[in-house]
């Protein structure tokens, strides 16, 4: 240990490195480039991972939206092309038959899928907005961010079919004055007055939402638009450990059974599987992380081997010097430690510089992606990963340095002194 902190030891190491600066720099760049690639690719992958997590933080990751379409196969006396109409009671059957379903909520809409939006007025101000008939369970699937003093639709609103609504940010801006509190105020939707109980902060919790949407209780929507027991689609959340792809297949199979649709008819029901998409995105991000690890390790290994080769050449050039050290009493262990220390120092120095440069690039990427419409947030590499990479570099530097170190120890003093 004393040898490690000896000033003469480090003077000799720096003297050896400075004898051929160009050769040393070129070799060090190999290791530096490896850790740089690892940090940048792993950090970029983490930034993408963080971005998608942030985008989907308001909605259950195992979410599925299921709706009905037209049949494509004749079945039980029904011709193909029959339009299927989902019913509210289908939700109970789906929940009972598919244990992987955690939450399910029927949804009706106006002005979303091709229909005319609802004309909404307040005083002399008016505009048209999409209206959603929501059950309170929807908030368990897609978190609704409501501004202070407001609330979302609750069970009492449903049971009593209350004429209350939650409006969007744009709706508030267009129908209310700037300094006016909309909570408790009234708007007229399709000639029916609704009391505003909340303002929702827009987040993309569905594939088709906007910042002007108006939410009303599902039962109120049913009476307002006379939808009866029908529903346009179901919003579903499976348990976290469920196979969402299989859950989607089971949902369609159960719906085919309920509505007497041919078991092989894949067109009768449609679905948007957010869980499947999210899984693919995470798989892609994990693939980039793994690729960065492999590429980085291979490049680092190549660079460390280059350092080993430099040290072999250095040992060859310092044969006489090493022989003199041995003749003056230097032990084989001291000579071995000197060479290994030089190898570890070069490897570690390269790694630290590579990490600093990689962190600088990630910081630049973070600044450049702040205001763009792309799911990319805070590209970083976890500290344990960085420490692990440095430890691997120290181990590799030690192992590779052992080769020229053993070569130096094998030099006999008498033979070294004969070298010219």
Image: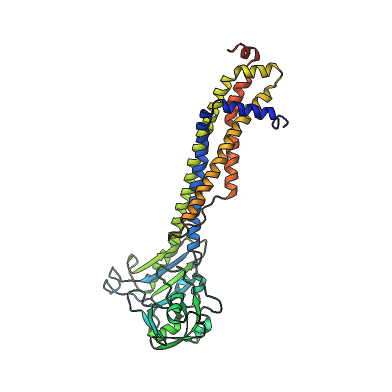
Give the quadrant of the C terminus: top right
Which residue reaches farthest top? 418
Give the quadrant of the N terminus: top right
Q: Position of residue 102 (x, y in %)?
A: 51, 69
Give the camera-side residue of 378 and 302.
378
Q: Is residue 297 visible?
A: no
Q: How is the image coloured?
A: rainbow
Above or below residue 226? Residue 284 is above
Above or below residue 189? Residue 322 is above
Q: Position of residue 51 (x, y in %)?
A: 48, 58
Q: Residue at x 56, y 25 (%)?
A: 19
Q: Is residue 189 visible?
A: yes
Q: Residue at x 52, y 38 (%)?
A: 32
Q: Position of residue 324 (x, y in %)?
A: 66, 17
Which residue reaches farthest right? 2
Q: Position of residue 224 (x, y in %)?
A: 40, 86
Give the camera-side residue of 212 and 361.
361
Total number of numbered discs in the rendering: 0
Q: Residue at x 50, y 39 (%)?
A: 34
Horizontal placement of 121 versus 49: left or right?
left
Give the camera-side residue of 232 and 121.
121
Q: Residue at x 36, y 74 (%)?
A: 112
């Amino acid at each position: 240990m004393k040898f490690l902190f000896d000033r003469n030891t480090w003077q000799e190491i720096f003297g050896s490195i400075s004898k051929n600066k160009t050769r040393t720099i070129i070799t060090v760049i190999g290791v530096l480039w490896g850790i740089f690639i690892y940090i940048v690719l792993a950090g970029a992958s983490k930034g993408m991972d963080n971005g998608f997590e942030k985008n989907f933080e308001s909605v259950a990751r195992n979410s599925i939206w299921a709706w009905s379409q037209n049949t494509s196969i004749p079945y039980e006396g029904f011709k193909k092309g029959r339009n299927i109409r989902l019913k509210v009671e289908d939700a109970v059957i789906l929940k009972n038959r598919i244990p992987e379903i955690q939450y399910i909520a029927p949804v009706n809409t106006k002005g979303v899928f091709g229909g005319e939006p609802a004309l909404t007025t307040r005083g002399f101000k008016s505009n048209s907005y999409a209206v959603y008939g929501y059950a309170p369970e929807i908030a368990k699937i897609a978190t609704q961010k409501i501004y202070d003093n407001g609330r979302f639709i609750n069970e009492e609103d449903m049971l009593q079919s209350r004429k209350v609504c939650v409006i969007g940010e744009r709706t508030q801006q267009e129908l209310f004055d700037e300094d006016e509190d909309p909570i408790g105020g009234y708007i007229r939707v399709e000639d029916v007055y609704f009391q505003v109980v909340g303002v929702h902060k827009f987040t993309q919790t569905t594939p088709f939402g906007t910042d002007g949407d108006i939410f009303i209780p599902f039962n109120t929507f049913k009476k307002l638009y006379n939808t009866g027991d029908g529903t346009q689609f179901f919003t579903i959340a499976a348990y976290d450990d469920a196979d969402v792809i299989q859950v989607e297949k089971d949902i369609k199979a159960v719906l085919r059974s309920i509505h007497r649709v041919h078991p092989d008819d894949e067109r009768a029901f449609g679905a948007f599987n957010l869980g499947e998409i999210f899984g693919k995105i995470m798989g892609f991000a994990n693939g980039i992380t793994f690729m960065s690890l492999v590429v980085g390790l291979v490049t680092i290994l190549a660079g460390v081997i280059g350092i080993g080769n430099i040290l072999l050449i250095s040992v060859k050039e310092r044969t006489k010097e090493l022989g003199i050290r041995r003749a003056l009493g230097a032990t084989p262990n001291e000579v071995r430690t000197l060479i290994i220390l030089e190898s570890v120092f070069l490897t570690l120095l390269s790694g630290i510089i590579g990490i600093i440069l990689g962190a600088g690039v990630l910081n630049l990427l973070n600044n450049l992606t702040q205001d763009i419409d792309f799911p990319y947030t805070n590209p970083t590499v976890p500290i344990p990963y960085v420490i692990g990479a440095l430890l691997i570099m120290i181990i590799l530097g030690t192992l590779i340095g052992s080769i020229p170190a053993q070569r130096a120890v094998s030099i006999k003093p008498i033979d070294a002194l004969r070298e010219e």
